């Protein structure tokens, strides 16, 4: 913990020295999570700064000619008034942008590890810490234009899955997305992914993965092409002058041969299991998303929604679910930091012939994200309350499942925590 605090104080000092204190108009994610067209940081001559520097959107950077090295990291610790406190994520990653081999293309190597996946090397295999590990060929100036990668990376289907974990508005992602992880779908997977900008507004992604869990699972799968996916995204509105943006997306995935799968329902804040149902066979999933950002009396707000529907052929399990999220910027100053309250509604509905009645799960979450004063958006205090509701047969859903949850999370990040 002391080492993490010391590292963050060093990064804050670098940010202050570089004068990077203003909110960027187009935040980018750490390279290990930049999998959607247009989101990657430029790496060509226009963005070149020789030697060591600090990029508030990415982390520590070393530029030597046409070679660029970027390193990032973050830690999130959750304190609970009831129950044990825990480290939610402690991640570190790097991207090596190698010199271009032809005028317009270069290759890159990316990795990201999460030390909590092995309880800081005390549990399970050390390979469990691997979140991302891949080799890519990409446009030398802007990886968002063209990028093809091979290895371990986040599945393309979900927008929220491809947001950096260190920049999430809530402790956990959508219930329907996190619960797909119980059958090892989505999240980090092994295979091939390709991204291409069709026009300045639209981009498309393809993937041939396994989608049954990979390096960070106890039973890794590496059958490239077991899952075939496509995702289309569009930036319908991007008025940077008035802060108004609108983006949409839709995707499809088909995954074969999920054996003896069990869908596990979890609570919204802590992720405690509260019920389960069979989910096996071939999985067909569809996804849709929409995100809108605007201003109200000079205060920025964002509204977003994403929904995923999945069907499992062998167990005949049908699971739709999604979320609605609203965030609002109360203030954003160097002296007081920036404060964003949020409210979120999640729902999941599961039906299968193996269970007489369907299971309906709902969760209401609310709280605040506060980037602390003088921290240059690198240290964040997050307070989140969750109310859980789940209805279903008693042999599936226990009566004593937790309903109220409260978590106080402290985030340290080498990249700025940006909400809008």
Image (cartoon, rainbow, N blue to C red):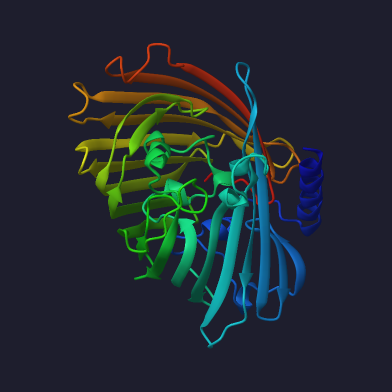
Query: As rendered, which of 379 and 100 lies closer to the eye?
Result: 100
Query: As rendered, which of 28 and 105 lies closer to the eye?
Result: 105
Quadrant of the image occupied by residue 350: top left
Residue beneath the point at 41% across and 65% down: 193
Q: Judge from the rendering whether residue 307 lies leftward or rightward of residue 117; answer left or right.
A: left
What x and y, as percent, mark residue 186?
40, 49
Q: Is residue 320 visible?
A: yes
Q: Judge from the rendering whether residue 284 lies leftward or rightward of residue 68; answer left or right.
A: left
What x and y, as percent, mark residue 100?
58, 83
Above/below status of 232 relative to 282: below
Which residue is most to the bottom?
102
Which residue is most to the top?
399
Query: As rendered, which of 246 and 90 lies closer to the eye?
Result: 90
Quadrant of the image occupied by residue 395: top left
Q: Judge from the rendering whether residue 313 lies leftward or rightward of residue 84; answer left or right.
A: left
Query: As rendered, which of 13 and 80 lies closer to the eye?
Result: 80
What x and y, as percent, mark residue 140?
54, 78
Residue beneath the point at 46% across and 16% down: 402
Above/below status of 265 relative to 380: above
Q: Is residue 27 visible?
A: no
Residue beneath the point at 35% across and 58% down: 233
Q: Quadrant of the N terminus?
A: top right
Number of numbered labels in the structure image: 0
What x and y, as percent, mark residue 98?
62, 77
């Amino acid at each position: 913990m002391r080492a993490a605090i010391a590292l963050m104080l060093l990064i804050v000092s670098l940010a202050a020295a570089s004068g990077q204190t203003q909110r960027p108009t187009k935040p980018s994610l750490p390279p290990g999570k930049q999998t959607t067209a247009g989101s990657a940081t430029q790496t060509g001559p226009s963005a070149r700064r020789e030697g060591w520097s600090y990029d508030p959107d990415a982390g520590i950077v070393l530029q030597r000619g046409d070679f660029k090295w970027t390193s990032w990291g973050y830690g999130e610790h959750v304190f609970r008034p009831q129950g044990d406190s825990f480290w939610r994520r402690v991640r570190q990653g790097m991207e090596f942008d190698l010199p271009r081999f032809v005028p317009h293309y270069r290759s890159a190597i990316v990795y990201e590890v999460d030390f909590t996946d092995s309880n800081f090397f005390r549990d399970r295999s050390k390979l469990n810490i691997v979140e991302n590990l891949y080799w890519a060929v990409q446009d030398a100036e802007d990886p968002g234009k063209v990028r093809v990668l091979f290895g371990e990376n986040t599945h393309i289907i979900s927008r929220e899955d491809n947001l950096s974990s260190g920049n999430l508005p809530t402790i956990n992602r959508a219930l329907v997305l996190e619960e797909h992880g119980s059958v090892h779908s989505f999240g980090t997977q092994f295979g091939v992914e390709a991204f291409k900008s069709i026009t300045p507004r639209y981009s498309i992604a393809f993937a041939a993965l396994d989608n049954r869990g990979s390096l960070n699972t106890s039973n890794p799968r590496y059958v490239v092409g077991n899952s075939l996916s496509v995702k289309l995204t569009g930036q319908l509105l991007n008025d940077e002058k008035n802060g108004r943006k609108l983006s949409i997306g839709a995707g499809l995935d088909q995954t074969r041969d999920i054996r003896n799968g069990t869908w596990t329902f979890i609570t919204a804040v802590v992720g405690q299991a509260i019920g389960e149902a069979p989910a096996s066979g071939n999985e067909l999933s569809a996804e849709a998303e929409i995100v809108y950002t605007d201003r109200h009396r000079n205060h920025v707000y964002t509204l977003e929604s994403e929904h995923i529907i999945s069907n499992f052929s062998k167990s005949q399990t049908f699971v739709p679910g999604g979320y609605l999220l609203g965030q609002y910027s109360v203030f954003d100053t160097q002296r007081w930091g920036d404060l964003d309250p949020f409210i979120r509604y999640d729902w999941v509905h599961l039906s299968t012939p193996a269970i007489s009645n369907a299971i309906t799960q709902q969760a209401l979450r609310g709280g605040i994200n506060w980037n602390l004063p003088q921290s240059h958006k690198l240290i964040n205090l997050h307070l989140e309350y969750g109310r859980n509701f789940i209805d279903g047969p008693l042999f599936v859903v226990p009566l004593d499942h937790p309903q109220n949850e409260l978590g106080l999370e402290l985030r340290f990040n080498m990249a700025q925590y940006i909400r809008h």
